[in-house]
Image (cartoon, rainbow, N blue to C red):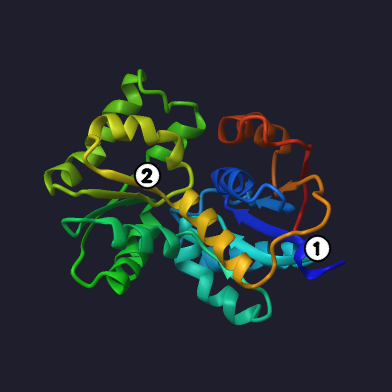
Amino acid sequence: MKESDKYIGVFDSGIGGLTVVKSIIDDIPGENIIYFGDTAHVPYGTRSKQQITEYVMNDVRFLNTFNIKAIVIACNTADSAAKTEVEKNYPDIPIFGVVEPASEKAAHITKNNRIGVIATNATIRSKAYEKAIKKYNPDAEVFSVACPLLVPLVEEGRFKTDDPVISEVVEEYLTPLKEKEIDTLVLGCTHYPLLHDVISAFIGDKTEIISSSAAAAEHLKTELAELDLLNSGEKKPGKYFVSDNAEFFEQKANMFMGDSLDVKVEQVNIE
């Protein structure tokens, strides 16, 4: 098998990484994808850096049992906590995350240098976005807010603009950012793209909203092209694995991917 025809391994703590998969399918539809959701240990966002790193290394070891040409850490929490460790242990595999692409995009498009970030507790604690954004734009002011209620609400299907519950929670979390007069907002969790319309309705159309999922797919396409790793061969069906409750995952997956999930999900034990 040619190197470029191998799979892209994508993983997340659960189901949110499917928004990254959906973006990859939209941007580079010829790529072959293997996805692993560590649903037995979801959520990562409330855990310690040490525990997250341990889970992440197990995830990567599992993906590396397949013919993969690259790995995408499709989880902001995992990326901010453990990407360096993955790169150190797998120096021959290109490792891509979600934090860096979204940070670079935000740093470059802001006009008033006031950037908001919403994410899980662990991602906010890591200051990963603040560090990355300031690397690309030292003049930027970064205002970060942890939003722990958003992930469970999204997974319960509460992401419609006419849903008063999610609208109230979004208003509660985003009011401090609106008061800071940010002109750019990073959705620093892969669940949050489903909340784009709800967030946009509150924050207003003068604020540019950046999805870390979409930014990651755009960056991946550029980098694979530069590495001459874009798939030129046959498109194979995707492979989807979880560490717990495949049936539940399949039911929820339609919210994140629509009809793009074209195969059954298999439950595996990777420990």
Give the x, y percent position of residue 31: 71, 53
Q: What kind of residue is marked 2?
A: Pro
User: Which residue is the site of mark 1?
Assistant: 66
Residue situated in front as seen by the camera: 70 or 5: 5
Secondary element at tag 2:
loop
Give the x, y percent position of residue 57: 63, 68
115 sits left or right of 148 in the view? left
Residue sitting at x 80%, y 45%: 237
Q: Which mark is residue 148?
A: 2
How many numbered markers are drawn?
2
Q: Which mark is residue 218?
A: none
The residue furthest right is 1
Q: Quadrant of the C terminus?
A: bottom right
Residue sitting at x 44%, y 52%: 212
Secondary element at tag 1:
loop
Distance from the alpha carbon under mark 1 to that under mark 2: 34 Å
180 sits left or right of 134 in the view? left
